[in-house]
Image (tube, rainbow, N blue to C red):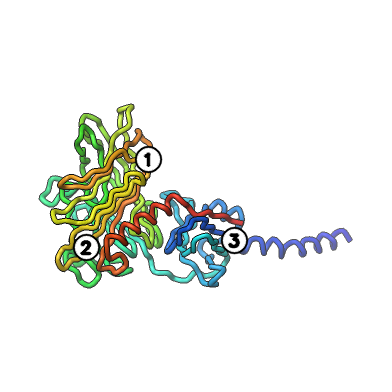
Amino acid sequence: MKIIKSLFLLAFALPLTAIAQTKTTVTIQNNSALDRKETLVAINWKNVLASYPQIDTTNFIVINNNTKKQVPYQLEHQGNSAVQNLLVQVDIKAKTSLTLSVQKGKPEVFAPKTYARYVPERMDDFAWENDKIAFRAYGKALEKTEGDAYGYDVWVKRTDKLVLNDRYKRNDYHTDNGDGLDYYHVGYTLGAGNMAPYVKDTIRYSGNYHQWKILDNGPLRSTFQLTFDTWNAGGIKVKATKTISIDAGSQLNRIENTYTFEDKNPLPVVVGIIRREKAGVISLNEQQGIIGYWEPTFDKDGTTAVGSIVTNPVSTMWVNKDQILAKTTVKNNEPIVYYSGAAWDKAGKITNSKQWFDYLNHFYQEVKNPLIVSVK
């Protein structure tokens, strides 16, 4: 009788255990007054495992409980062997919540929306893009050549497809073949939102990056690190590592810089955007750390918008004949996070300066009002 009773209890318990291990529920709460569109949300993987320990990373799906449709996702590693976050891209209206189910199933094939790579065939470029915009940083091979430049470059696009490889393969990225082009000039400036030490009232540019490492590469977020050799920043020896992430659906990169230097005092730094000779529209918001620039139109190539959002307190912003600058400080070996990016009027989504400045303000509010994620 005891054996029969034990088997009965085991049979009764197994279905409950199986049910508990076949799915988990994620709730994303938007308490702000902002509608979130194409927002990338990071769900801590440890929390997913705690609720759904039997999850198979090669055979699960994420379902929007309202639409009953699959949601695109990515397992983010941040350079580690173990998964760190489950990334999902969703829309959430203001003052509402969204419920997702993570469960066993065959995921649909979604087109990748971000990509980054080292480009040895083009003088050590490092290029990256998402479904909105593209960028590149200049590498060691370009140093001290006629085409050398210090800042970040912008490649405008008017397609949600990934275009970097095609443009490099054609070796003709200065011509618009229907999806955009590179007509952005950087030169000896910070370009589209690079950062550099500002010592004795002078920007102390580093050399180009010398080492690179990809931490994640799509389909929804690409993250990589660029390392810069030690340089003399006005009498202060400085070394830098810059970790850049681009998310699907975003016009801006998240940039995390870590400066190492021997001085005990904080290091002054500036974020800068190159200014054109012809008149454009400039917006400076010191209180929120936002620089906005709507460039003058370049004939048939259209208009590029560039912007940066500095999360550290900004002491001053100013405009000179070459650049638009925001000044702040960093501490030795402590990361500073800011956001920088661009848009193009010919993409048809942001077509005037007001829309661009509104976009930057909205992005700032999103950063200040993060979504609340719970797993159960």
Q: Secondary structure at mark 1?
A: loop
Residue 114's place in the image compared with 179, above or below, is: above
Q: Position of residue 54 (x, y in %)?
A: 60, 59
Q: Is residue 304 left or right of residue 74?
A: left
Q: Considering the image in quadrants, where does the C terminus appear?
A: bottom right
Residue found farthest to the right? 1
Residue flagged by tag 1: what amino acid is it? Pro
Upstream in sequence: badge 2 or badge 3: 3
Marks 2 and 3 sit apart, C-alpha to C-alpha, by 44 Å
Q: Position of residue 277 (x, y in %)?
A: 13, 53
Residue 318's place in the image compared with 89, above or below, is: above
Nearer to the camera, 124 or 70: 70
Marks 2 and 1 sit apart, C-alpha to C-alpha, by 33 Å
Q: Considering the image in quadrants, where does the N terminus appear?
A: bottom right
Tell me the quarter of the picture where residue 350 sits: bottom left
Residue flagged by tag 3: what amino acid is it? Thr
Q: Does the CB distance between marks 2 and 1 fall below 8 Å?
A: no
Q: Does the CB distance between marks 2 and 3 fall below 8 Å?
A: no
Nearer to the camera, 95 or 2: 95
For residue 303, which numbered disc appears in the image?
A: 2
Identify the residue position indicated by label 1 in the image: 335
Upstream in sequence: badge 3 or badge 1: 3
Q: Residues within 10 Å of mark 3 (few under 14, many from 20)?
A: some
Marks 3 and 1 sit apart, C-alpha to C-alpha, by 33 Å
Instruction: Please indicate, yes or no, whether residue 91 appears anywhere in the rendered image.
Output: yes
Upstream in sequence: badge 2 or badge 1: 2
- Identified at 48% across, 55% down, the residue is 42
Instruction: Please indicate, yes or no, whether residue 243 appears anywhere in the rendered image.
Output: no
For residue 25, which numbered disc appears in the image?
A: 3
Q: Position of residue 44 (x, y in %)?
A: 52, 52
Q: Is residue 42 left or right of residue 279?
A: right
Q: Secondary structure at mark 2?
A: loop
